[in-house]
Image (cartoon, rainbow, N blue to C red):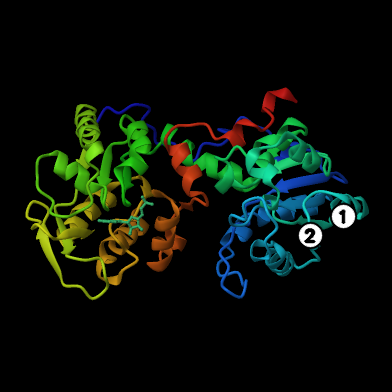
Amino acid sequence: MAKKNSSDNPVPIKDILNKLTIEDLDIKGKRVFIRADFNVPLDDNLRITDDRRIRSTLPTINYAIDEGARVILASHLGRPKGKVDPRFSLAPVAKRLQRLLDKEVIFCQDCIGHQADNLVAKMKEGDVLLIENLRFHPGEEKNDEEFARALAKLADYYVNDAFGTAHRAHASIVGIPKFLPSAAGFLLKKEIEYLKGVVINPVRPFVAILGGAKVSGKIGVLENLVDKVDKVIIGGGMAYTFIKAMGYEVGDSLVETEMLDLAERIRARLIKNNVKFYLPVDCVIAQSIEAGSETKIVTTQEIPKGWRALDIGPASVKLFSEVIQDAKTIIWNGPMGVFEVDAFSRGTFAVAHAVSDAYALTIVGGGDTDLAVHRAGVSDSISFISTGGGASLQLLEGKELPGIAALTDKKET
Ligand code: AMP
């Protein structure tokens, strides 16, 4: 198939990020402000239930420590809405970091002000300080210039490693870089290399698997990928808007009426571009989403009134697996069904296994899909799992992330 920019070169492409990275900075002895994404889930006793977000930034933190920087770490946690709320304190993160780094992590109870200034002034080379939740101040989400200036005052350099927040124009993401030389951390760089690199220079066949609840959530990705991929697989709730748009009845399945025309137009564009387009051919249906409700497997053309499709069926799994098996590059975002409920989880887990078995570069994005590959026990055999849901979608939509745009261009030095 004569496809645009076909290549046998391995992805990701290096140097796709035309911004300074932490390795470009001379950070020895310098105060380095690292914006991380420590927005981890906590249980009712404020214990961290999943520390992957903390672990994913360790290469950047360890590098800064080893280089002899004074390391100032900052993050948001949850949505405290500009007020101090102990439920969203980063204190548990400080403790976990201490264990992961195997060294003392000084914790400052405010991210700006006297205490922060004093603690930073006392830091020695290689010391690590974590400042309290940035969103305890309303200036963070409002991108207030004074707040950004107060944060910038703490440091000589700014490093962004918070990919999960890079699509937000907040003070600690786009505000601080106005005042300091600013670079990407290793995680940020890796996310860009995979998510952007793969779309520019995929090894073919390049397959996109999209699922999840709604077409509207993935429409930007579809529009961007229409002339880049070789094959598109659509599962999850969004499939039924496409099937309905083709003129079939889909019972009570999820349909976005206002998206029907667009769904048809996209399908036409995919066909025009010679992109193979796969929709579920069968599905698991139920009258209610509740666990324990009666289920049936029917073809997607025979969904009765009062029933809704909540997972792809075995024939779709077989069809999708054939396509996946043949791929050399796979991007997957969105579950194939309501995988949170056992009865509707098989399709998603089967696709997770197919993706992990494929002899391909495999990229998974989105919180639900990330959870699904972990639950399926195949996360170790996925090439790259993005740490950012919204940010990864925005990149796949071909959009620039404010947090990346704000960093210092490479040629400026
Ligand atoms: P999204 O955030 O758009 O990726 O959607 C993820 C959600 O889509 C998950 O919580 C799934 O339960 C839901 N989902 C997947 N398939 C279906 C379906 N067939 N009907 C309704 N919801 C679905």
In the displayed structure, would residue 342 be above or below residue 17?
below
Does the rendering let one see residue 41?
A: yes
In the displayed structure, would residue 276 be above or below residue 330?
above
- Closer to the camera, 54 or 175? 175
In the displayed structure, would residue 149 be above or below residue 234?
above
- Closer to the camera, 93 or 44? 44
| Relative horizontal placement of residue 50, taking residue 260 as reference (left or right) | right
Task: Classify residue 77 by image quadrant.
Answer: bottom right
Of the 4 image quadrants, the one containing the N terminus is top left
- Closer to the camera, 89 or 404? 89
Does the rendering let one see residue 278?
A: no
Mark 2 secondary-structure assignment = loop
Query: Residue 73: x and y, percent?
Result: 74, 52
- Closer to the camera, 338 or 26? 338
Residue at (70, 58) in percent of width and height: 84
Residue at (64, 39) in percent of width and height: 142
Callout 1 touching callout 2 (CB < 8 Å): yes
Of the 4 image quadrants, the one containing the C terminus is top right
Mark 1 / mark 2, whichever is N-terminal: 2
Task: Classify residue 88 by image quadrant.
Answer: bottom right
Residue ID for mark 1? 115
Crowding at dot 2, Cα within 10 Å, few <14 / some 14-19 / many 20+, comes out as some
Residue ID for mark 2? 109
Q: Which quarter holds ligand 1?
A: bottom left
Mark 1 secondary-structure assignment = helix
